Image (cartoon, helix red, strand yellow):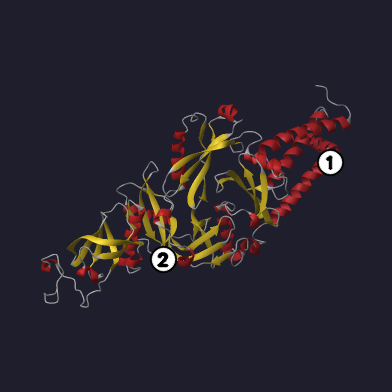
Amino acid sequence: MHLPSSRFGQILLSLLITALVGLGVFYVTLPALNLHSSDFYSFVITLCVVYLLCTLVTSGFRAGQGAGAGRGEQFREYLGFLKKQCLPVLVLLALLALVALVGLVISLPIFRASAYRDLLTVGDGDFASDIAEISFSEIPTLDRASAEYLGDRQMGTLSDMVSQFEYSNDSTQINYQGRPVRVAPIAYADLIKWFTNHSEGLPAYVVVDMVTQEAQVVRLSEGMKYSFSEPLNRNIQRHLRFQYPTYMFDEPQFEIDEEGQPWWIAPRVVKTIGLFGGTDIQGAVLCNAITGECQYYDIAEVPTWVDNVYTAGLVMEQYDYHGTLVNGFLNSVLGQRDVTVTTDGYNYIALNDDVYVYTGITSANADQSNLGFLLSNQRTKQTKFYSAPGATERAAQASAEGVVQDLGYKATFPLLMNVAGEPTYFIPLQDNTLLVKSYAMVNVAQYQIVATANTVSQCEQEYIRMLSEKGITQAEDLPQTEASGPVAEIRSAVLEGNTYYFVRLEGEEVFYSLSAAQNPLAVILNVGDTVTIQHAVGEESSILEGYTLTVQGKAAPQAPLVSETPEEQTQDTPPTDSQPQG
């Protein structure tokens, strides 16, 4: 190979080779052209090294050509050559190293403790008022692993394309039309399948309802051209980099808007402390997954249907700075007064058409108790701390698994709920195939209070009954509804020394259980009377517990009703004042 003899030609050839290598490296690694990005420094250093090597080759330089030249002499010859031929590049390398070193030092928490502490603003919240009691028809019963397992199984419905595409296993939890769901795009099965199908794009995405556990493949009229499974220019990360070469991005998240249109949400990352510290989100780029059209929004202008801008990991990282540096850097290492950190794990809560990430807050000693909980809006980063001392999520999982240890069920990561005003862990229990078989509710403050059942509503009722027995709440706090109509049938029985009346209304098959001690009107109830009964919500049960009885046109007896023992109960009618009392 003939190399240029002139110095100008050598430099030009070295620059050309460096540019070609640089384009290849940029295309593969996609660094942000931004001084706040560590990838940028790695990219520039790579280019400088390539140029130096090219200069050595194109100049035909051979060190130590003289007889008897040692390694020390060869090294000095290299340095002399580089100083003569590549001085600008060496200066650039030194300058970059200096900038990076100074930027790293001034970004350290030891010098900027207050700035790190203030990355996250945390307010105090009232759990009972802020976190509304969720109906059992709105409670998510799946974790991410279970939802993705169901989504993968649903791919079998794509019988006409099942060999071409697969489930991506990259789901995002969102609120869609008022329902908590997980959405995920499908992906090309392999490179050959991409080659034969990429012109039409990905034809569908998968939606898994986190409440009903129903998975659905949603077909699109026009395929998604931009995704992670695209290997070339339509790869979503490469597409975003070409559109916004200086922006630093967090990993794009797949979402759908209220009309079911697929989008990629790419949070824009900024460094707010020094050069490399204080990671935060300044806005987000919304990319249409079908057309590739992109639009950037500042954080205050992000559309309300978007649910994922601040990731759970970022929120937890910022709180850990907030909690550990509350009294300065030295205190975080030595005295650790008032130092708190997040627990190991997180989950999501749907509130007011937004998705909130929540995690427990514990002391720096990371013991088995929580001090409270953190809720942070993933779109706005509005964050509140709720004081609720009690068990950690892991301790609650172990407590729930202990109740069903004979069945071998495993507890998923808990979901924080408000049940009868009490902070409560709701824990779906799975078998070894990741299918939900049972449910548990564990009281945060007293994690030995554990209720389990095969349905959510039964678990909720059993849990509140246990709270009532412990004197924490009242049975009347059970979720209730009303039933009205003429009485079709009445039966009575004595249970544990108390008289109960079982009432069936016309047109219904269930009986309502009424305690005579709590509902004296039951004593004078007759078939044909029109009544209204407030009762517990139930599923798959022929007997529902009633709490309040109203009978049209009748008033309760004036004499107090005293419970009778089983030995004194001789007929289906209650005792009168003339009968002996127990």
Q: Amino acid at mark 2?
A: Gly
Disc 2 crowd, CA 10 A, few/some/many (<14, 14-19, 20+): some
Classify residue 519 by image quadrant.
bottom left
**In front of the other: label 2 or label 1?**
2
Residue at the spot x=80%, y=42% of the render? 90
Question: Where does residue 337 sit, x and y in percent of width and height?
Answer: 54, 68
Label 2 or label 1, whichever comes before in sequence order: 1
Question: Where does residue 537 sit, x and y in percent of width and height?
Answer: 34, 58
Q: Is residue 486 left or right of residue 463?
A: left
Is 223 or 114 nearer to us in this picture?
223
Give the residue at mark 1: 87
Question: Where does residue 447 sit, x and y in percent of width and height?
Answer: 37, 61
Label drawn at residue 421: 2
Secondary structure under the numbered disc 1 in the rendered image: helix
User: Looking at the picture, does residue 418 appear above or below residue 7?
Assistant: below
Q: Is residue 189 left or right of residue 462?
A: right
CB under 8 Å between callouts 2 and 1? no
User: Looking at the picture, does residue 208 appear above or below residue 360?
Assistant: above
Disc 1 crowd, CA 10 A, few/some/many (<14, 14-19, 20+): few
Q: Amino acid at mark 1?
A: Leu
Residue at the spot x=37%, y=42% of the render? 432
